[in-house]
Amino acid sequence: MAKLKKGFIVVLGVCLLSLVSTSAPVYAIDNPDSGPFILQVDAYQNLNTDGDTLFVVRINIPYATAPDEPSSEAFIGRLLLAGETMAETTPYAFHNSGYGYNTFAFYETSGITWEAAYTVNLSGSPTLDWSGDVPSVSVTTVGWHTSSSPALSQNLLASNILDWASSLTGHWSVALLTATAGGSVLSSGYGVQYFTNVIPYLKLLCPSVLPTSQTPVTYEDQDLQGAGSAAVTEQWPFDFSGMSDWMGLPDVNWLHVLITMVLVVFVCVMLKLDAKMSLIASFSIVILVTIPGFLDPIVAAAIIFVAVLGAGLVFILGKPIV
């Protein structure tokens, strides 16, 4: 019987390690029908503070049928200088899950060298299983627009935003503009919702494009730690960014490390519990990981498997595995 117990423990350990050895699940996705494309890149300076810079990037990711993953999970926009990533974001999933014509932007209060040889890249998330090569496009042509006067810089940006909003209105058949006595502004519904999420701090950088009755919308940076995954990592309550930067690992890897530690502790406890307590512990952890949106479905399934396996071993043996 002692050998049987040890055998079960070894099998349990092997199952546990195999389940958590992969840092993140991989999801399949078709490549775009063509492209993707970066249509235009414009840079604006001195909008709110001296030396700040905003890059506005017009894109097109053509799909006849949008993938299950929104553009915010499938694609990443980057600003690079001499091969080094200076900023990154994801295309906002607003119309048609973010596919087709869309926009992303980078805003930096300092650190941007004006008219330097920047590259703007749009590429598929490497965490996805693409049907072909990972889609990617890069451009080095940037329209540089600057003025020593914030008001003049904001006027240049306003012209761009309203022009692009007019084009998107035609592409999407959604009204992004509203006519006023002083000229067009973003519509209080779709226009404001889209551009305040696409362009960081739009209320500060270009207030003239907003309707006068518009309540300021707080911009929230899009989280890249779960790009390409169905995991709802934006709801994850802990911040591993400091440790991630120190160790050079993405936040999602630290999430899986934490899950691994929890599984190890759980199995160790299971080995000491009697049958009734094992059932209670297993039931509790199953309920925990099946709370909607708490963990990636594959990770949750792995934890449930280990919990059920541990409880099953205790019941099969009829007593604690010690």
Image: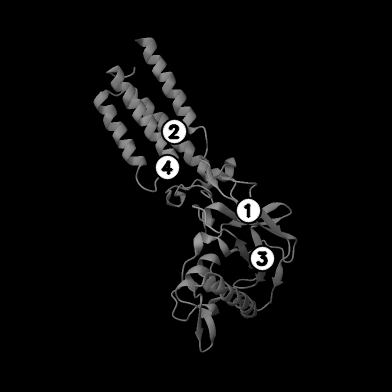
Q: Nearer the viewer, mark 2 or mark 1?
A: 1
Left or right: where 271 falls relative to 149: left
The disc labelled 1 sits on which kind of residue?
Ser
Label 2, label 3: how many angstroms apart (C-alpha)? 46 Å
Can you identify the residue that label 4 sits on? 297
Which of pointers 4 and 1 lies earlier in the amino acid sequence? 1
Which of pointers 2 and 1 lies earlier in the amino acid sequence? 1
Name the foreground residue: 308 vs 224: 308
Residue 93, visible in the rendered structure: no
Q: Nearer the viewer, mark 4 or mark 2?
A: 4
Can you identify the residue that label 2 sits on? 261
| Label 2 element class | helix
Quarter holding the N terminus? top left
The disc labelled 2 sits on which kind of residue?
Met
Left or right: where 116 falls relative to 278: right
Label 3, label 4: how many angstroms apart (C-alpha)? 36 Å
